[in-house]
Amino acid sequence: MVTFTDLYAEYGVKSPHDLFERLREERPLFQVELPNGVPLWFVTRYADCRAGLGDARLSNRIGTRIVSQDVLPAEIRSSMGTHMLRVDGTDHTRLRRLVSSVFTAKRIEHLRPMIEQMTSELLDRMAVREQPDAIHELAYPLPMQVICELLGVPVSDHQRFQAWSNAYLAGVGTANFPVDVVTEFVYYVRDLVKQKRAEPDDKLLSAMISARDNEDRLAENELTSMCFLLIIAGYETTVNLLGNGTAMLLADPELADRLRADHDAIPAAVEEFLRYESPVPGASFRVATETLELGGQTVQEGELVLISLLSANRDEQSFPDSMAFEADRTPNPHMAFGYGMHYCLGAPLARLEAEIAFRQLLERFPKMERKDPSAELRWRPGLVMRGLTELPVTLNQ
Ligand code: HEM
């Protein structure tokens, strides 16, 4: 069976966008083998991706079939994998309902002053760095500080989170799943829960614990898994949006000027950043609970499916001139936050962080440039994130 490495070689391309353009044309749904040998159906056209995400027969409950994670001891797997993105139906509704009130656009808007303050402090620090890097000084720390604050996790643990979640995400689907890292992460989260149970505060994690303790709604493994999910889902995804968007602004000074002059145009540009370099390139793996037809192919019961959001969002059938970046593209029905019942819970938060970060960055460093504009952008390895490893800049202040 063909691998992604084979496909890049076969088509003689380097960028996933070039590869996916060919695949949408020639092989919209086909079987591919992951680096760890697991086969799955890869879906590249917008219409098929949307149909797949809306199809209840494609389940998130992939259990131990999750790529390479069967190497994990069952108790660790259960403490990290019993979350809403791994279940369907009423279990999903129950888990999602428990935290959804925190993530409504209205509630999230209340975080604005705090996020503005955090951003401004990060930019103060960036301003005095000898070798500033937009990924390390802004894109990484901001979402981490926000999610830690929301959950009530000590901000001093940033570095450890970053190392854990980086290693975890780089390992998904590869032959080297980082068992030790994940185990450490899970132990940390368990300790945290213990600590919060002893000394509750008014933050989200304590609220989730009391929801469980008072009404017996969240089992222990669900609680730790929910924390694991929120940290992973709320962190690196937003890092990539901030990093990718900053790179696009730096590549297009006219766009930067336009947005600086008209802040109201920033939200639409954020939507286009999300479409153009989708921070989460694929939805989480799905498994067919019965044999079904998708994109003209028969997916057998038990087979795995990977829906490519990065590809769907560049589909020329759904987005006119899809390879062009258009900051005011309307309509822009991108699927960077997914589609259907698992649609991203944190979308309002990610949008707010992005709007604030880009606005402040544009205002604060109007002459910022890439340190070496001719250097190729360096993308993170692994299948599950579309983001840059670094973005050295010159502030020219
Ligand atoms: C730019 C930033 C983000 C992007 C691109 C993104 C993308 C996504 C995508 C594509 C999904 C659906 C996955 C699937 O169907 O398999 C998803 C689900 C989810 N996201 Fe986000 N996300 C972002 C930020 C956040 C933030 C900030 C949070 C929370 C703090 C968050 C929490 C979640 C949760 C809890 C789910 C699971 C929802 C469910 O299963 O019902 N995300 N996200």
Image: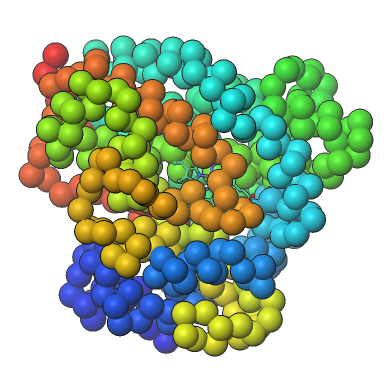
Outermost residue toward the right in this view: 215
Q: How is the image coloured?
A: rainbow
Any part of residue 191 in sight: no
Any part of residue 58 in sight: yes
174 sits to left or right of 275: right
Rendered view: 257 above or below 228? above
Is residue 351 or residue 185 the one in the foreground? Answer: 351
179 sits to left or right of 279: right
Rendered view: 178 above or below 285? above
216 sits to left or right of 153: right
Q: Which x, y percent locates residue 368?
A: 16, 24
Q: Which x, y percent locates residue 66?
A: 61, 66
Is residue 375 or residue 300 the one in the foreground? Answer: 300
Q: Which x, y percent locates residue 294?
A: 52, 79
Is residue 269 or residue 393 the one in the foreground? Answer: 269
**In the picture, which quadrant includes the C terminus?**
top left
- State the residue at coordinates (68%, 37%): 100
Outermost residue toward the left in this view: 374
Rendered view: 390 above or below 301? above
- State the residue at coordinates (25%, 40%): 327
Q: Which x, y percent locates residue 184?
A: 62, 43
- State the residue at coordinates (65%, 63%): 60
Instruction: Name the quadrant containing residue 64.
Output: bottom right
Instruction: Name the quadrant containing residue 103.
Output: top right
- State the residue at coordinates (42%, 86%): 1
